[in-house]
Amino acid sequence: TNREILVLCHKLGLRVTLSDHRLHAALCDEQNRRALLQSVIDDYASCPALHGYHLFDEPHQRDFAALSDTLALLWQLDPIHEGYVNLFANYVPSELLGFDDYATYVRRFVADVSPSILSYDHYHFLTDEPMPAYDLPNERESMIFESAYCKENRPGFFDNVEDIRTAAMQANIPFMVIVLLTAHGPCRDLTEA
């Protein structure tokens, strides 16, 4: 499927940040990390539509060391395509971050992981529907789900931008925010306004 996506995106003039299960496996398997990363690079690096590799979404502090090692090795093996990690937003509980406050989480991520870009998502516009009951696989997913279902528009959008911007400027790297575009989970459809 990834190959088909890359071919189609190339035809359309689009670039892809690719996700592949071997990238996550490389984070968890230090002994086979090089071989796993090399297999991904061998499969995709020659594709003209490839922009980079999506390694991890919303890491906890305990993931930083493996992310740092994996990103460094990925850059060594493929210096053309970036490794990408997306951070939590400032509205998640500190237990998910591994730090007492969000600004420390962001600063330590930059210092410990040395990313090439600082990225996060912040979904601001929420529905007022009650939280449905789901059988979630673990406590982490339950906390993410519960923090998503607050009953008002999330505060802190601009504070979040400022925390990320400040850390990115200090590290001299670009930053980006992924914002709500379509309804999903507890997020509502946007209006034209």
Image (cartoon, grey):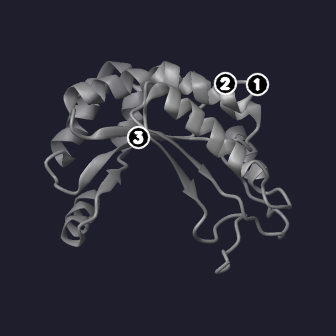
Q: Is residue 8 above or below residue 47?
A: below
Q: Is residue 63 left or right of residue 155?
A: left
Label 2 with label 1: CB-CB less than 8 Å: yes
192 or 148: nearer the viewer? 192
Mark 3 burial class by Cα count in 10 Å: few <14, some 14-19, many 20+: many
Give the residue at x 76% y 65%.
126
Give the residue at x 76% y 37%.
93
Q: Determine which quarter of the picture holds residue 132.
A: bottom right
192 or 8: nearer the viewer? 192
Give the residue at x 64% y 67%.
184
Could you say which disc has been placed on residue 84 in the image? 3
The answer to whether residue 170 is visible is: yes
Question: What residue did someone put label 1 on?
Answer: 100
**Residue type pointed to by label 3:** Tyr
Q: Is residue 17 above or below residue 76?
A: below
**Residue type pointed to by label 2:** Thr
